[in-house]
Image (tube, rainbow, N blue to C red):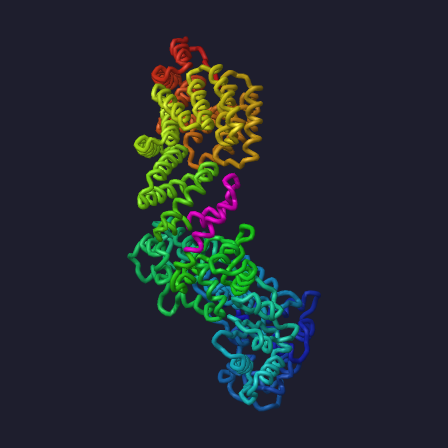
Amino acid sequence: MTKPNAQRLMALTRLRREVGLSLTDMARRCGLQGKQSHQTAGAWERGGYVPSPRRRPRMIGYLWDDLQLRNAPETFEAVWAILEEEWGWDPISNEEWASFTSQPRPLPAGDQREAIQPAPFQAPAAIPHFVGREEDIQQVCHALGQERSEAIALVGMGGIGKTAIAVHVAHTLRAQFMDGVFWANAMIAAPLDIAQSWARASGYDFRDLPDIESRAAAIRAVLADKQALVIIDDAVDVTGIRALLPSGARCRVLLTTRSHDVAAGLNARIVPIGELHATQGVSLLRRVLGPERIAAEEEAAQAICSLVEGLPLAVEIIAQRLNSRRDQPLSDMLALLRNASERLDALHISDRAVRAAFEVSWTQLHDGLRTLFACTGVFEGAPFTARALAYMVAATETSATNLLWELQALSLMSKAEEPNRFRQHALLADFAREKIEDDSLYLTRMIEFYQLFLREKGEDDLLPAEEWRNVMFAMHAAARRNCWAAVLGYTALLASRWLTQAEYDRARQGYALAAEAARQLDAEDQLTQVLIGWGDICYAQNKFDESGKYLRQGLTLARQRRDQLHTAQAQYYLARLALQQGVHEETDQRLTDSLAAYRAAGDICGESKVQALRAELLFQIGEYDEAIALCSQARQTQAQCGSAFDLIETLQILVNIGFAQRDYQQAERYLDELRGELETRNLVAKSGECYLSLATLNRYRKEWEKAWKWSEKSRIISEKTGRRVWLARTLYEQAIIRTEMGMTAEGLALGEESLAIMTELRDQYSCVICMKVLGDFYLRAGKRDRAEALWIRGKRLAQSLQHPITRQFDERLHAPASTDHVNSG
């Protein structure tokens, strides 16, 4: 026998409560005994299990006498028909009927089965592809299940899934509300019609009550003693809705609305509804399209959900479109969605569209709010400040802030995670841009604003991470609008920040725009400067071939223009590039030429840079005393010039010399000074090198855990900034740390990874050191063949570089096989 239908058996509960009986009363009158008898009776009503047929006589008496159905024999017949179907009991024969009453029998029981209607359930059908939202649903169900509960309001933007959650809650809680679930769509139905709909579902007709006050009062009276759930979907107005809300102690109210103000006006507890998490969005696609199709294009599925920022309506539409086009790859849909100007066109199917969902909110905005909302689309979903928006719409910051809060109350804007910033859902931003007839004025003012912002910040001030996107967007906007002078203005304001904050990818984009701007304006002096800066950034990101190309182009232009300063700069950076690649003669010559040009230009700060780089050259060939002397001279000049970035590079050289000489006190002294400079300057680009030095210092002290901690910090920054030279050196340091900690296999793997990157980048000085130490570790691991292969390669390279450790390779290669040359210094 199948499990009884709890919804139909609720007729027993409703009839019992109408006569004021408790479950304990029912249990006693049905012949149940014991402390738990009321629970047994409750289980009968809920369909938990079927009572024994031996309870039949007592049940007949209970229905006929205790529930007073002797006064409504038709209802008795209808209830018994339910028990026949749900409990499997036999029909009442005419003889049995005559045994407990002398009343004539109404109609055959089969004709009376619809006499008792199930409780009203007006909620839409369950949603077949509903996923996620477990926390939201649990929170709502818990709140609605409390003994005394305030109204609950699901608040969020159009298409966010408020209605879907409400439908799911209605089906989940249906059995708990024995008197029904009443539903209304307040967006399309007037309060007068809603009241009539609920009345008819309850068996009443209020058409003779023509005004909302009378009809609302009547429906509240009907619901007053009911255990019912009232759901009002898409509430947009407080006045009409408030009149409909029941006040009965057993009634519960669930609202959905886009407006925080409407929810507050109805004294509802707000449950904010956000986007689907990435995994939930992919789960929705998987449920519609099938696991095989998603597994074949998992990355595309994730990217699709990311592009639409987890908006459930958008994900559902995409899923249905792809489902109707079984052979279309997800990658095709992804490409379509990446075109922001056509994205909303793709997000519709049949009568469902994301644009239509947003249009509902747009129609509710007054003119001033429409103007501001449209302008926010320029930011394309990125966080922005009220001040920036105020400048763009020529308003005060206070008025712009107030309007932004108004949009937030309508779920058309949200408070960003970053402090003092707002943001829009990306699809809302697409919709907002469609409402701008001509964005030229807004973009022009945006370009102006962020230049003013950068000038106010000052070159040494750290540009907040959340502003980088908007600043670069404004620079790109200037280029698209052929505002070439503005592009060069941005370059001048950002050049040092790109370097010190390690924003290398953005810098390369910016320099590409700046080079085009300089060519368009025929500004050779600025083109020269741009090319040299571009080459410097490429070097920082280990794009050495590109770096050399741009630096040589810049040098050619500088020489043609007899520009001593830019000639000096180009020669200096080319010298640094040659040193990195181990070409010492070229390094020496370019440093000599750079120094002469700096002196001709009267730039003593530039001279100090040359001194420091020559000190690095001397350090690499083992001339430590001369290197220290040059660093000391450079430091004095750099301190006078206030060249913090250059001073930090000089201090780093002195730290490395201290390590090479095993003078750890000296290394620590310079390292402390270096850390002090970094803490006051916020130089992200140099912090990774400092962390690596701290790892090395702690490794020399055999403080392995501290050493590993600092090396991990260095690795994270190196990976984040794309500085693969320093990533390779960090991996080398980690290889030593792990090997010395006894983790030989991990140490060897890290060492091989480090050497591979060094070789790829042609960091020949570092390759020599790495091959020596890695060979030592292989020897320790009993793999002499691999050790000797590394030492032979290292010796050849060391000889070509005039490296001071060439002799150490000979010692290792000619030592007896049993000798263990392990030196991690």
Q: Position of residue 92 (x, y in %)?
A: 55, 81
**Residue 525: x, y in percent?**
35, 38
Q: Is residue 110 left or right of residue 435?
A: right
Camera-side residue: 98 or 269?
Answer: 269
Q: Is residue 465 magenta?
A: yes
Observer able to see residue 757: no
Kindly give the residue lying farthest to the right in the view shown: 35
Q: Is 320 one of the magenta-colored residues?
A: no
Q: Position of residue 327 (x, y in %)?
A: 28, 57
Q: As drawn, which residue projects farthest toward the left? A: 327
Classify 194 as above or below 131: below
Residue 374 point in image, percent of width and height: 44, 62
- Can residue 361 be seen by looking at this rendering? yes
248 left or right of 370 in image: right
Q: Nearer the viewer, residue 788 or 610?
A: 610
Q: Nearer the viewer, residue 187 or 129?
A: 187
Our reading of the magenta stretch's main secondary structure is helix
Residue segment shown in magenta = 444-473
Determine which quarter of the picture holds residue 397.
Answer: bottom right
Q: Is residue 744 above or below residue 298?
A: above
Work out whether 437 lies above or below 806. Answer: below
**Which residue is painted at 33% across and 31% down in the image?**
562
| Count of residue discs | 0
| Residue under the image location 52 percent in, 46 percent down | 456
**Nearer to the camera, 536 or 664:** 536
Does residue 338 appear to the left or right of 413 in the view shown? left
